[in-house]
Amino acid sequence: MVLMFFNERSCVSNATQDEARQAMLDFIKVCQAVWQIHRGTTLVSEVRLEDVEISPGYYLQQWRNEPANHDAWQFMRRTLQRKAPLSGVLPRPPEDQESEYRHEGDPVLGLAAAHLMKMLAVSLPTGPRWAAPWLKVDYEILDDDVLTTDSANVHHASEDAHVREHEDWIRTTAASATTSGVQLWEERDTLFPYLQFVPGVEQNLRELPGVAVANVRAELVRLNTAAENWKPGESEPSWAVKVVPESDTRIHMGLVDFTDLDGVKRTFSPHVRYQPHQGRIHFRLIAEEGRIRVGYVGRKRLTAGVPRNAR
């Protein structure tokens, strides 16, 4: 799951009500852009969003009740506002540990949470202070009477350009959160939008041993990146992973023939390897679409004991 932590400091401004209305609509667009990258995204706030004061004397609850904002609010309510407050999301610190995070001298809870959870902070676009894809936080941690002082940069978005800058990181973060082959299959369109999968891969992934999930996920992410960067006219992508052709012997034995999307069996010779158990991801290139089509994920197929679903 990808979490977006709401930066409560972005509500502290002298914006007029009209400026606050527009800032909210722009904020929704940012959330929607992240959601398009990963549809499991959740927005987290320290308080109920309806209680947030988005400009002096003007609360999000008032904004929500205005007819023009109905659709935007429904998006927030149905798809994002599922986890609050921060205390229900953040890991509990040791009893003898205290910490404080500041941005430009001001205490910040949402930015602190984004840093601690290695997630994304999101802000209302209420001023130049928040018009950056990275925000610096200074923090102090008192642990067993030892004071540590340091600073860090937090992934941040308050406009579409910031989301685009973090797109690969968001997708990788989403992928790293998956813990089963079932999740890989069910979230494939979000995690690997530049890959295609033949029907037999569903069973491959659903039966994937837990010990192999992280490695399969990592290889699929690399293949997805290669497909995303595949330029028209190039015979194949620039590989960020070692791609191996299948041997003629195994091809002639039909060990890398799989049923394609149109029901026709085709040879999926190129493959990448993963551990453990001599794992293989077989695929073929769909040059006319600039996509990589995955035909099989699983153990190296042998003459004997070939999985029934892969025959």
Image (cartoon, rainbow, N blue to C red):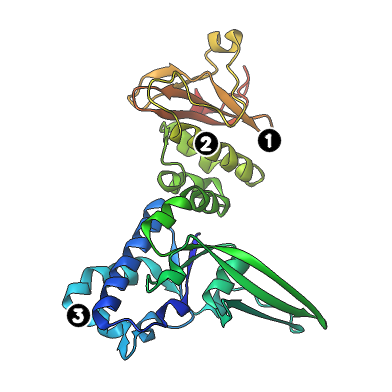
Between 244 and 260, the one nearer to me in the picture: 244
- In the rendered image, is residue 38 in sight? no
Q: Quadrant of residue 76?
A: bottom left
Q: Position of residue 139 (x, y in %)?
A: 66, 75
Q: Residue tagged by mark 2? A: 204
Residue drawn at point x = 41 percent, y = 65 percent: 158
Q: Residue tagged by mark 1? A: 275
Between 176 and 31, the one nearer to me in the picture: 31
Q: Residue tagged by mark 3? A: 66
Crowding near pointer 3: few (<14 within 10 Å), some, many (20+)? few
The amino acid pointed to by label 3 is Glu
Above or below residue 217? Residue 289 is above
Crowding near pointer 1: few (<14 within 10 Å), some, many (20+)? some
The amino acid pointed to by label 2 is Asn
Residue drawn at point x = 60 percent, y = 30 percent: 241
The amino acid pointed to by label 1 is Gln
Q: Which mark is residue 142?
A: none
